[in-house]
Image (cartoon, rainbow, N blue to C red):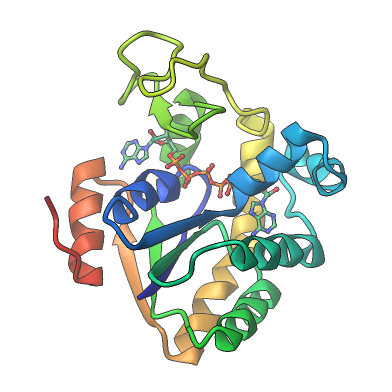
Amino acid sequence: MNVVLLGPPGVGKGTQGVFITSEPGWVRIVTGDLLRDSVTSGSKLGLEAEAYMTSGQLVPDALIVALVRDHLVHLELQGSLVFDGFPRTAGQASELTEMLNLLGKRVDSVVVLQAEEQDLVERISGRRSCPTCKSVYNIHTSPPEKSGFCDVEGSALIHRTDDNPETVLSRLQVYRSETEPVVHYYQELGSKVCLIDGSKSVDEVRTNIAQVLGLVTA
Ligand code: AP5
């Protein structure tokens, strides 16, 4: 089964993506993390992408599609895939369909997480991330055991540079104009599209996603 996780910034795609892929046989492809790693490494793609990310705009389709294609080539693709943060435009969705076709795969389910924008802004203001293992915390609702440090790696946690209020508003606007149409793309394609209330607790959202995807919960 291959799954696309859609939803506005801060709705919990990363948090839930980790749960879905915690079972063996699942691979998670997170374009935000791939881009941030490219920026950190100083690669040509990272240098090109950084200005878009800092201002809350989407990186151009051609760049992100090339990044995903290159990543897929290097993955063991026997199991199930979860795409987190991709596709974000109808053009990217169409490219993904073609890429998966070549691999004899398709998007089976699209999980769309939804929540009020005010809640998203609050969540994002409290988010802290581990730059090493990508674990996500929230200083208000899910803080690390030792303040400021990752429970897994011990690395100092960071507040993402695009998590400031102005950039978050821009990211929300881009989501509405560019990414919401992707839902219609998948409805027309005949994929199973599941709308999930992302404003509920992390555990409730997890249970609801497991239910619609037919996963066994621990
Ligand atoms: P990306 O990294 O993908 O950011 P995003 O889509 O804006 O999503 P976020 O990572 O902000 O949020 P999330 O939904 O994963 O929430 P999380 O689980 O962390 O993209 C960043 C940038 O890269 C883009 O702006 C763009 O420039 C570029 N980019 C990436 N992909 C691209 C593409 N395909 N095309 C073009 N450009 C691309 O949770 C957020 C917080 O809330 C955490 O603190 C968490 O602990 C907390 N939380 C989660 N769930 C709950 C809950 N149920 N209740 C309470 N708190 C919760």
Residue 161 or 132: which is nearer the viewer? 132
**Residue 201 visible in the snapshot:** no
Image location of residue 58, percent across then percent down: 73, 54
In this image, 185 relative to 25: left or right?
Answer: right
Query: Which residue is located at x 38 percent, y 70 percent?
Result: 79
Query: Which residue is located at x 67 percent, y 72 percent?
Result: 92
In this image, 152 relative to 8: left or right?
Answer: left
Q: Is residue 18 above or below residue 105?
A: above
Image location of residue 138, percent across then percent down: 39, 25
Query: Which residue is located at x 63 percent, y 67 percent?
Result: 73
Residue 57 or 166: which is nearer the viewer? 57
Q: Is residue 6 above or below residue 104?
A: above
Query: Which residue is located at x 44 percent, y 15 percent?
Result: 154
Looking at the rendered structure, the number of numbered marks drawn on it comes to 0
* Quarter of the figure that contains the N terminus: bottom left
In this image, 38 relative to 111: left or right?
Answer: right
Image location of residue 56, percent across then percent down: 71, 44
Q: Is residue 87 above or below residue 169?
A: below
Q: Quadrant of residue 136?
A: top left
